[in-house]
Image (cartoon, rainbow, N blue to C red):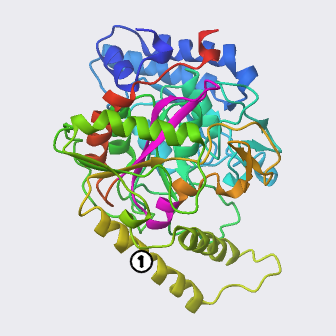
Amino acid sequence: MQIVFASTTELAAAIRRKQVSAVEVLDAHLRQIDRHNSALNAVVTMDVERARKRAKDADRALAQKQLWGPLHGVPFTLKDAFATAGVRTTVGFQPLADHVPRDDSTVAARLKDAGAILMGKTNVAELLGDFQTSNPIFGRTNNPWNLERTPGGSSGGAAAALASGMTPFEIGTDLSASIRLPGAYCGVFGLKPTERRVAMTGVVPDPRGTPRALRVMACAGPMARTVEDLAVLFRIIAGPDRFDTEIQPVPVEESPKAALKPLKIALARTFPELPVASSIHDALASLAKTLRPLCRHVKEVDEAGLPAVKVSDDLSRAGKLIGMALGAFESQGQTPATLAAYLEALHHRDRSIVAWEQFFDSWDVLLSPVSMVNAFPHCQPGSPLQVDGKNETYWLVSAHGALFNYTGHPAIVLPCSQDPDGLPIGIQVVGRRWSESRLLGIARALSKVTGPFRRPPLAHA
């Protein structure tokens, strides 16, 4: 077992069996960070002294037959959007450059309670507001598959660290494909749960105490190098915390072992009005051909086979809904939206949610692109992006994923293949709301076809 590319579950089992110590696992990851972080700039804040003490404590506890939890002794990094007690949390925002929270976010606390050891924080887009990862405090993060390309955003530091073996797992946030986009661009796995599944307490800390504005669409979920790890991590972080009052007490069941044979799979090479690169289009077509003899039914669906909602309208409404929420306390000279307008926006959203739920009455999952392109060259945000030689609107880059932020459906990104430039191609697997456990089981079965995590070139250096 090579420590830095072992899965989270493998590492936890090896530590429990005393095949390797928590200190050895931590030191291996710290060496990997020393080796590759100067090129990637993925890990931006370290907490080595406290991590090493915690690892020593973990080994002593095991020697006394004490087990802290399912992640006992496993080190990890965490996206610099989650508050971490005593460790700087900035969200890439200059006014928070020296912000050190007193309390852990719920996600950080649950991971620690499960026995995991925080090593440091990973880079983000400023205030999580871009599809690339750069900010005025820490600068730009690069993609381990090609340093001239973006790892995506806003969880780009998380995905780059994970793909390069600097951490065994991460937790991202996702308002507009911010888990799935970096997952696809860096060739790792990620789960965007149903909204209101994971408590958002302590996410994007606001020392001013401004009321939380984003109460729909935003969520947090795990990123890893196997589907099995996603399932373990999701069980740890999901559920009510007594502070985020909107989190539903839906039981998190064990992820069942799913077989491909009974599955009815819909596959969309793109959605109406959304461009997509030919490499992604062809990868999905090839996957459909491979899956047909393995499944009960695999059908490529076009506009006629999709819910009767206008994708461009839904994306526009998603943007307006986010704008209403963010503008409620910082309108920047604009007239705040009325309550009637906000409720009208939620009404339209309800209609789209119902339409997609009815779609999943007929299909077990939907396979689709994550993005219109694979990892694109670093550029000024807002610049047109090349899709097969044609300029396309920058802000459409997350549209395939953002559609399911709007409806709140759970979605998993699986690495699928590579494009002619050797960059990863990811696919999106979408299921019914509140069905994460079943979706993870199906994704595990699909991953036997799409393939395992592949190390990027930088990780072989």
Question: How many numbered discs sit on the rendered protein?
Answer: 1
Instruction: Give the quadrant of the N terminus.
Output: top left
Disc 1 marks which residue? 350
Q: Nearer the viewer, residue 32 or 141?
A: 141
Q: Is residue 331 shown left or right of residue 301?
A: right
User: Could you say where residue 259 lies in the image, as x and y percent from the top left?
Assistant: 19, 37
Q: Is residue 253 visible?
A: yes
Q: Is residue 299 above or below residue 427?
A: below
Q: Nearer the viewer, residue 51 or 326?
A: 326
Q: Is residue 254 shown left or right of residue 401?
A: left
Residue at position x 32%, y 13% in the image: 63
Residue at position x 26%, y 50% in the image: 252
Q: Quadrant of residue 337?
A: bottom right
Q: Is residue 386 above or below residue 199?
A: above
Residue 113 magenta: no
Q: Is residue 230 visible?
A: no
Q: Is residue 383 shown left or right of residue 285?
A: right
What is the span of residues highlighted in magenta in the rendered image? Answer: 403-430
- Crowding at dot 1, Cα within 10 Å, few <14 / some 14-19 / many 20+, comes out as few
Instruction: Give the quadrant of the C terminus.
Output: top right
Residue 417 magenta: yes
Q: Is residue 378 above or below residue 393?
A: above
